[in-house]
Structures are given as structure tokens and as C-alpha cells.
Amino acid sequence: REIRCRNPPPSRPRKRRGGNRRNDDKDGGAVPEEEDEGDKYTNVIVMGGQQIRDYFWAHYKPQMLDRSQPPSLSAAADWALRLGAQKHESRIFAALTDNYQIWDYSSALLVRSGILRFQPWIARDVEERIRVDTSDLPLDVSYDAMHVRRGDKLESDARTFVRRYWDDSGMYDEETGGMPRNYIPFAHYLAQFDDGAACGEDEDEAPPRLVYVATDDPGEVRREIAEDLPEDMEGNPVLVAANGCRIKFRFVFGRPPSEGDEEASSSIMAYHIDGDVSKGDCEDRYARNIAGIADLMILAKANIFVGEFNSNWGRLVRAFRLRVNDSTKVMNGARPVLTKGEMRIAWGHKHQGPPGW
């Protein structure tokens, strides 16, 4: 459905039809205001989430990726300029033909230009949430971050990858479909920090690695840490690397989205806005949104991010970590066109595309 919205100048009073009459007629109906010559109008298409995706695929996606003829090249350069690109960056963008590079470059421009920004009250509440959540995570020091997405994904998108993981481990029963757990273990995410480096002589004296954990399944993840990982003399969880080195960790979890019912806050569904009325009122849903956005910001700023792109949240984190490569050599065809904050993929596709793809 398409509607037409008026954007009136803020300083000029509105004229109403019928002189000084109120904007309600005697039958209770609204009396439309008169149109002034200086009025500006915007056509707005009202859509649901799936409608937006369908419209994007059918209408905008082919235009955004088209580099076949000269008009499409100039259109791509103009698009880049509107996203905040410099002149030379717009030429680089117009010359890109790889779909993934086009999306990544546009994502990096969006992040840099600040087009993606929060409403003031959202920014305020997210900042407060981060301030409280990071009381155990000093953001002025180097830290790493992990995103462990489970929930409904285990019954849909992630199911094939989970089965493949346990099959590769020799622990999947083909006949019954049985496996030790219906998810990929937390220890597998931790293994991404094993870069094969030689053990240091002062390994036991080294401080633990500080890692922020964002997950919709904190209760189970905490249980895995307690039961699956050994500890050092100081109680720090330890991962034994493939070469026998011991990597110490200190994990920080954010607060539950909604304070109150401890049992409900520890459940997977307490971390998702989708669902029926049993998931709380608008304030509860708002709290979950703020908690999720705060996690997103913390993940985006981490030194190393470990996660997967099966989740749209993981793809958003990736988008926020993209940076345009400002090397002059890129103009002459050098690659990559982007630099990325270090990201290590625990499982699944190495590059799934932008959020909503």
C-alpha cells in the first residue's frame, strides 16, 4: 500500500479549510487541511518484513548489482556518493563486479557515514545498558568477543551444520539421528582462538584472555564452561590447544534483558522479541531490543570476533566491522578493497552475505 505524506515547513502555521473552524466537522469526521504551494510530499510504501525483502529482491537488487552498461556505472558511482563515499571511492565502487565486494563496500560506507544510527532515546538506553553491562568488561583494554546463537536456529538453519559437526566427530548415529547435543559445543567456538602459536615459557603467568560472550542460551553455555573446561589454580577456565598449550580465559556475560523472574530471564526465549503474549509486555520487549543492540555494539568493537554468519546478528556484526581500504593502490586494481576487524568463523558459511540476504 502506498500513501502520500506531507512534510510541512516547521515555522509556518497550517491553513485549515473553513477559516477558523476546528479540524472536526459536525459529524465527527476529520476535515482535511488545505494544501499550500510550498508543501513538500513524500511517497511512502507501507510494507511488512517479508514484503520488504520480496520488493528488494525483485526491484532494487538487480539495479544495485548491475555493472553491464555505462549508465549503470554512473548510477553506481552516484549511489556511492550518496552513501558518503569520496570521489575516488565512488569510482572504485562503480568498478566492482563481484557481488560480495559490492555489498561489503556499500556496508562499509554506510557504517562510516553514520547513515545507520539510532533514535536519541535508543542511543541513550543502549549507552546506559553498555555502561552497566561492562562493569566487569573495561572497554579501554583489549578484549575479544563471541556470539553463540542457538534458540530456534537449532530447528531450522543450523540443523544441517550441527549434524555435520557431530558426524565429522564420529558421534552421529545415522539410523536414529542421535547425537550427544543438538548444538555445536561452546568449546568449538573457543577452539578458534587456537592459532597454533608456540607455548610461552611464562604460560602459567600470562593473564587470562578477556572474552565477552553474547548468547541467547547463557544458562547452557555457563554449564558447558563449568563441566567441559578444566580450570587453572586461580579458577580460570582453560582450553588445551592442539599443540598442548594452555589458553586461559575470563568470560564476561551481559545481564539478562529483563530483570525480575530469574528463571524466565535464563531461558532462550527471553532473549528474542518474536513470540506470543507470554513473552511479556511492550516494556519487556523493548528491554530485549536494547540488550540485543548493546551486545551488537560490544561485539563490533572487539579485538577478535568469533561467531557465525548463519544468524543475521552475526552478519550485522560483520558489517559494523568492515572498513574501506584507503590505500592508493586500490585505485590501480589492488585488492582487497576493504579491511576487516579480525573475525573467526566457528562453523557454517564463511561469507553469507548482508543481513536479510
Image (tube, grey):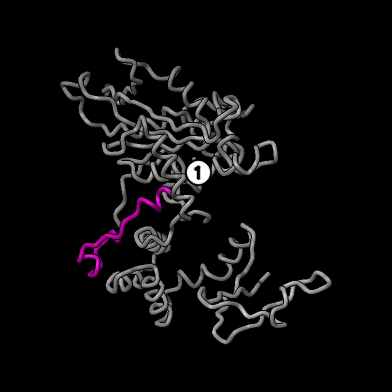
Residue 238 sits above or below residue 345 on the image: above
Percent position of residue 199, x then y: 20, 25
Q: Which quadrant holds residue 23?
A: bottom right
354 or 121, nearer to the observer = 121
Q: Which quadrant holds residue 111?
A: bottom left
Q: Residues within 10 Å of mark 1 (few under 14, many from 20)?
A: many
Residue at 48% across, 35% down: 215
Percent position of residue 91, x then y: 31, 74
- Of all residues, the one furthest to the right in this rendering is 27
Residue 13 sits above or below residue 256 on the image: below
Verify whether residue 61 appears in magenta: no
Residue at 31% across, 56% down: 323
Q: For the residue labelled by badge 1, is the local secondary structure a helix, a strand or a loop?
A: helix
Residue 154 sits above or below residue 86 on the image: above
Which region is colored magenta?
317-337
Amino acid carrying label 1: it is: Ile
Verify whether residue 333 appears in magenta: yes
**Observer able to see residue 271:** yes
Q: Which residue is mark 1?
A: 290
